[in-house]
Amino acid sequence: MIKVIGWIVFLLLALVVVWSIGKSISSTSLRYPAIPSFSVPQYTTPAVISERTPPTQGAATSSGLAQPEKPQETSLGAQDGQGDISPLHGFVHLIRTGVSAVDPNKEYIEIRVSGDAPTAVPLSGWTLENSSHTRVSIGEGVEVFFPAPTPNISAGIVLKPGMKAVVSTGQSPVGISFRLNSCAGYLDQSRKFTPPLPSNSCPRLTGSLETRTFLDDACLDYIDTVPRCSSPVPPGTLSRECHAYVVSHTTYNSCFSAYRNTPNFSGAEWRIFLQRNQELWKERSEAIILRDHTGRVVDALAY
């Protein structure tokens, strides 16, 4: 009986201990709540952005700045806002040749007409214009340049397909614009043209059947060595007859009289002179515009 009572007391004490421990845990939970679990977000290192703005034009240098593109020579077309286009655009061309000369008598430019041009080109009344908007009109000339004392009467200049004109800024050495012919090279003997007149277009100096009857062999041999378009002074060892013959037959006048009515006497080139005392084209940074008689652009170039 005493043993049973002891077990009962032991159980009661055990219950009291268990109850006390549970109450203590409950009180602690109220003061320190449990920390909820969560997932830690994953971060990646952001890419470094350069403070320099990348160049959009030109090549980049080591400093990150853009190099300006190299300027290029410009070919100025007739459509580049310089006025209406002439129907002859594409058939008449400006050629940059002697534009760098400072002396107006040595400054010149070429105008060429294509061989497939639909018509002849009436050049008189057309204008040439520079970058300073100075316009110079192309005047008249002579189709056939007559030697003195025959007067030369100017008329309109016409370039047929395949022909060209050398347009000089300065004064004409013969006082007028003219079309070249087979004898024109003789004019360069006493006057200086820029560019020089053709030196191989003149007929060779030959003795006719009549002259061969009174010219000796030494003179005939010398005549065969005389260059075209030249006016030499024969050596003193030759006869007076030979000397007189050579001097009188190596001039523009004598050549003109002998060959004026031969086929193909007239050439395919004009020499035109604007009769200015100052240069018209700059050596660089220049724009040249060719306009027809209505002001429409025929051709243009820039350099």
Image (cartoon, rainbow, N blue to C red):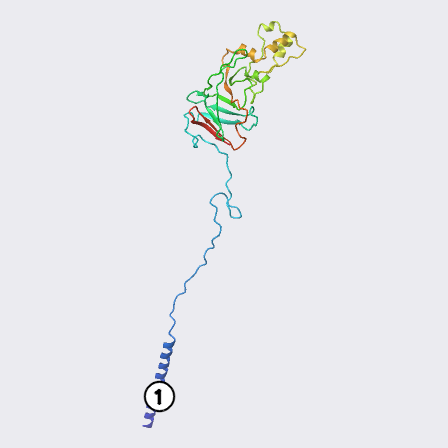
Q: Residue 67: x percent and y percent? A: 51, 43
- Residue 26 position by quadrant: bottom left
| Above or below 2: residue 171 | above
| Above or below 135: residue 188 | above
| Above or below 16: residue 289 | above
Q: Residue 97: x percent and y percent? A: 53, 27
- Residue 250 position by quadrant: top right
Q: Is residue 202 left or right of residue 88?
A: right
Q: Nearer the viewer, residue 147 or 125?
A: 125
| Above or below 137: residue 215 | above
Q: Is residue 209 left or right of residue 164?
A: right
Q: Nearer the viewer, residue 140 or 42?
A: 140
Bin the neighbour count of mark 1 within 10 Å (Cα to Cα): few under 14, some 14-19, many 20 and up.
few
Residue hosting label 1? 13
Quadrant where the image shows the N terminus: bottom left
Q: Secondary structure at mark 1?
A: helix
Which residue does the image show at 36% across and 84% down from the upper left? 20
Report the label total.
1
Hey, what amino acid is under mark 1? Leu
Q: Residue 225: x percent and y percent? A: 61, 14
Residue at the bottom extreme of this rendering: 2
Q: Is residue 253 left or right of residue 162?
A: right
Residue at the right extreme of this rendering: 237
Q: Nearer the viewer, residue 150 or 40?
A: 150
Which residue does the image show at 37% across and 81% down from the upper left? 24
